Amino acid sequence: MQKETMLVVEDEDIMRDALEDYFSGEGHTVDTAQDGDKALEKFNLNNYDIMIIDLRLPGRDGLSVLKEVRKRNPQAKVIMITAYPSLETETQAREGGAIDYLTKPFELNYLETLIRQSFEVDIVPTPVVEEPVEEILPTPCIWSQAGIAKQRGCDMGYTCERGCQFHAAMMKQEKFRNDERIKPYLEKLHSLLGKSRCKYTMSGDLSYRSCTRLFNCAGCELDQAIQYRSDLKFSAKKKPQTEQAAQVTIKEKPIRTDH
């Protein structure tokens, strides 16, 4: 992750110190504020790359700070955090321009992942892409072609759903998964896969099998069984050969000739 300048706005000392220590340890420049007014004072003096704002603050609350920050800089990247989540405040935060809304407690490395992704994704809405999708599988990344992510290369072909961590992370977030700009690209991938044909039919492993879960192979019992069998074969190859059974030599008694 590239090094960013951050402002952490949190009234709880333990949480504020934890965020400051973690991100400073990762090489980022971190400022802190205990309330909304102090946060806006610092925001006026610095152009922060990312702001982490608690929802409940003394005096001016987090949503009010978010509104003022986005008013002064519509491109500001803000992540809201709270120990008191509600659908109402989450909706207000997202509509107000927050790029995410996290419920405490959360993993700090997950927060760092969200921050990293925020610099790969264009958060400014753009019109729906109306041009036809090219007939070849997308290179660069389909998310770049859709105008959602910044320029990214792709060498995964049509196996995006199985091997691409970036694609998986984007699909987990509803606002990206349901973005109208990506839908024609997902549909194109679907059509290139043969619509209802299982990928094992496409690869020649099966003579024929229909499929309605092209974008959810992880939930397919057949796929799980094949992957399990493949893992077993791989494990068997790695096992050391068992010791050969000890050979037993039987000596025949000489025939007696003294009687």
Image (spheres, grey):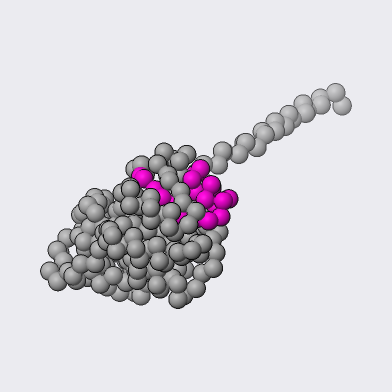
Task: Count all numbered tags in the image, as a single digit.
Answer: 0
Residue sitting at x 54%, y 68%: 84
Q: Nearer the viewer, residue 48 or 247?
A: 48
| Residue 200 visible to the viewer | no
Residue sitting at x 50%, y 48%: 19
| Residue 133 visible to the viewer | yes
Is the residue 56 above or below the residue 120 in the image? below
Q: Quadrant of residue 134?
A: bottom left
Residue sitting at x 44%, y 59%: 36
Q: Report the magenta residues as a range.
A: 4-22
Looking at this rendering, what residue extends furthest in the left direction?
131
**Quarter of the figure that contains the C terminus:** top right
Q: Quadrant of residue 5?
A: top left
Q: Nearer the viewer, residue 235 or 87?
A: 87
Q: Is residue 7 magenta?
A: yes
Residue sitting at x 77%, y 26%: 254
Looking at this rendering, what residue extends furthest in the right direction?
259
**Quarter of the figure that contains the N terminus:** top left
Q: Nearer the viewer, residue 190 or 151?
A: 151
- Find residue 66 and report its horizontal and vertical position in percent: 38, 63
Q: Is residue 40 magenta?
A: no
Is the residue 84 above or below the residue 13 in the image? below
Q: Is residue 107 left or right of residue 65?
A: right
- Find residue 140 and report its horizontal and vertical position in percent: 21, 54
- Find residue 94 and report its horizontal and vertical position in percent: 37, 68
- Find residue 182 and report its horizontal and vertical position in percent: 25, 67
Q: Quadrant of residue 88?
A: bottom left
